[in-house]
Image (cartoon, grey):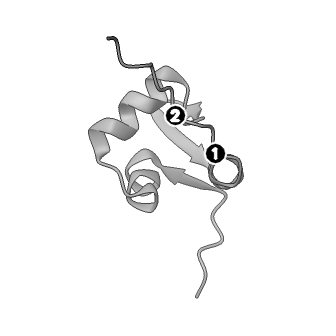
Amino acid sequence: MEDKRLTLSVEEAAKLLGIGRNLAYDRVKTGEIPVLKIGRRLLVPRSALEKLLAEPKPPNVTPASK
């Protein structure tokens, strides 16, 4: 059965993204992963995560110095 929840925990979002828990919390802190704060809980809206994956941004690549 498909999960119909509208939000995910940061840990669940990390699993779906294939990244570690610490990296996910770091990206939440920088605003790269959007969250809702309800009380002490941080929840990642499923729609925001899907939008993030549908519209990836190019990585910040700095040119190598010579």
Residue 65: horizontal and vertical position, in percent?
34, 12
Structural crowding at the residue carrying mark 2, measured as other residues with C-alpha within 10 Å and reported as few (<14), some (14–19) or many (≥20): few
Q: Quadrant of residue 15?
A: bottom left
Q: Amino acid at mark 2?
A: Pro
Q: Disc 1 marks which residue?
A: 56
Q: Quadrant of residue 6?
A: bottom right
Q: Amino acid at mark 1?
A: Pro
Q: Identify the residue at image location x=53%, y=54%.
A: 8
Q: Name the residue nearer the viewer: 64 or 6.
A: 64
Residue 37: horizontal and vertical position, in percent?
56, 30
**In this rendering, the label closer to the viewer, 1 or 2:** 2
Q: Disc 2 marks which residue?
A: 59
Structural crowding at the residue carrying mark 1, measured as other residues with C-alpha within 10 Å and reported as few (<14), some (14–19) or many (≥20): few
Image quadrant holding the N terminus, namely bottom right
Residue 44: horizontal and vertical position, in percent?
57, 45
Give the CA distance from mark 1 to mark 2: 9 Å
- Say if 29 sits above or below 7 in the image: above
Residue 43: horizontal and vertical position, in percent?
54, 43
